[in-house]
């Protein structure tokens, strides 16, 4: 049996390679060469990985659900709440055996934070930034999905931090979303700050940008009885001045997520990660990200030269 990976960009290629490393047969299909009728006729497909641009989701989910194929869908699910609803309606037959690709839920620091008592937290912040021009070798922002007004931009691209906040503090809503754009890419956010909160607290921010000259990924959680700071790149957690460095290899997150997906495909329950982003449990996060995107307010532009 074959696992189809639709979308032959860097993330699709990673998923295909990881499936092969896990002993599976993966077939990588570029979206531009996707032949729906030919795929519908196939009887050798066990599951579907959707690694396309964000605006290409619903049609593939509908196809997979009709065929009974569980899906691994790259994040974010969608950038409008109406589309989130349509996808969940279509995915219902396979949602309990499907996964949404928030691999940061497998990061050792995120798992460690989730295992601690955060009940008296009153504030949090998560921040991620890098120079988008240095993102990948032989890659141009202007030619990528990220440069699209519909489905591109930093909020959608780097939405893992929104998921982390929602994962640690369920029930958050969007209180505001403020962005800077770029004159050459109308409607595309290059730096965005989302304010999130829930009744009774906590309240916090998620900031992401394409502009930082130094790559960073960090978080801070403040409680009435604790102070925790995290550097997700090292990774290291500092708790009241006491620091712990964790073992980390980036691709292990992707592999662990794929292992859980394969277990779901075959009727298992996964490897025991309580944060596993099973699709049927992830609707609040998908809606939160879409709500933030819809709430963006642009206040000006960054001046970085895109080349």
Image (spheres, rainbow, N blue to C red):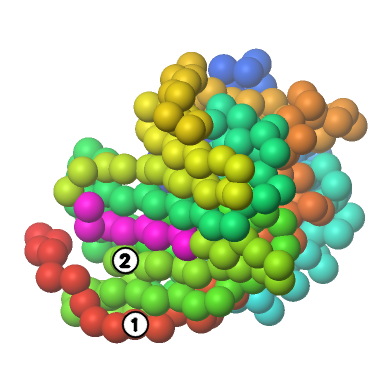
Is residue 38 visible in the rendered image? The answer is no
- Left or right, 64 with respect to 81, comes to right
Mark 2 vs mark 1, CA separation in Å: 10 Å
Compared to residue 11, the image places residue 17 above or below, namely above
For this orientation, the residue located farthest to the front is 225
Is residue 245 visible in the rendered image? The answer is yes
Tell me where residue 77 sits by quadrant: bottom right
User: Who is closer to the viewer here, 244 or 305?
Assistant: 244
Where residue 98 appears, x then y in whole percent?
77, 45
Chain part drawn in magenta: 205-212
Is-magenta flag for residue 55? Answer: no
Where residue 162 appears, x then y in whole percent?
54, 57
User: Who is closer to the viewer here, 129 or 18?
Assistant: 129
Q: Which residue is mark 1?
A: 298
Where residue 73 appears, x then y in whole percent?
64, 50
Marking on residue 113: none
Sequence order check: which comes first, mark 2 or mark 1? 2
Question: Around disc 1, counting alpha carbons within 10 Å, would you say few (fewer than 14), some (14 to 19), or many (20 or more)?
Answer: some
Q: Quadrant of the C terminus?
A: bottom left
The residue at 58%/49% (across/down) is: 223
The residue at 81%/34% (across/down) is: 264
């Amino acid at each position: 049996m074959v696992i189809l990976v639709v979308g032959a960009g860097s993330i699709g290629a990673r998923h295909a390679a990881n499936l092969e490393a896990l002993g599976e047969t993966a077939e990588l299909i570029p979206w531009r060469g996707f032949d729906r009728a030919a795929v519908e006729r196939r009887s050798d497909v066990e599951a579907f990985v959707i690694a396309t641009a964000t605006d290409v989701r619903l049609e593939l989910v509908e196809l997979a659900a009709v065929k009974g194929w569980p899906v691994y869908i790259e994040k974010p699910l969608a950038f409008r709440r109406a589309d989130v609803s349509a996808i969940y309606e279509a995915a219902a037959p396979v949602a309990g055996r499907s996964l949404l690709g928030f691999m940061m839920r497998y990061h050792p620091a995120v798992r460690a934070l989730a295992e601690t008592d955060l009940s008296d937290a009153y504030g949090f912040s998560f921040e991620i930034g890098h120079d988008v021009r240095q993102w990948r070798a032989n890659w141009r922002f202007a030619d990528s999905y990220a440069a699209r007004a519909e489905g591109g931009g930093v909020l959608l691209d780097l939405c893992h931090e929104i998921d982390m906040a929602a994962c640690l503090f369920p029930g958050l809503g969007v209180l505001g979303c403020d962005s800077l754009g770029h004159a050459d890419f109308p409607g595309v956010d290059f730096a965005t700050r989302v304010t999130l909160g829930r009744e009774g607290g906590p309240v916090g921010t998620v900031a992401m940008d394409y502009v930082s000259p130094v790559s960073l990924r960090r978080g801070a959680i403040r409680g009435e009885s604790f102070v925790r700071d995290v550097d997700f790149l090292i990774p290291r957690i500092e708790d009241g001045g006491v620091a712990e460095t964790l073992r980390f290899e980036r691709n292990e997150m992707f592999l662990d997520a794929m292992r859980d997906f394969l277990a779901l495909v075959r009727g298992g329950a996964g490897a025991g990660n309580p944060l596993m982003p099973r699709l049927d449990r992830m609707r609040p996060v998908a809606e939160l990200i879409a709500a933030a995107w819809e709430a963006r307010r642009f206040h000006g532009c960054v001046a970085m030269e895109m080349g």
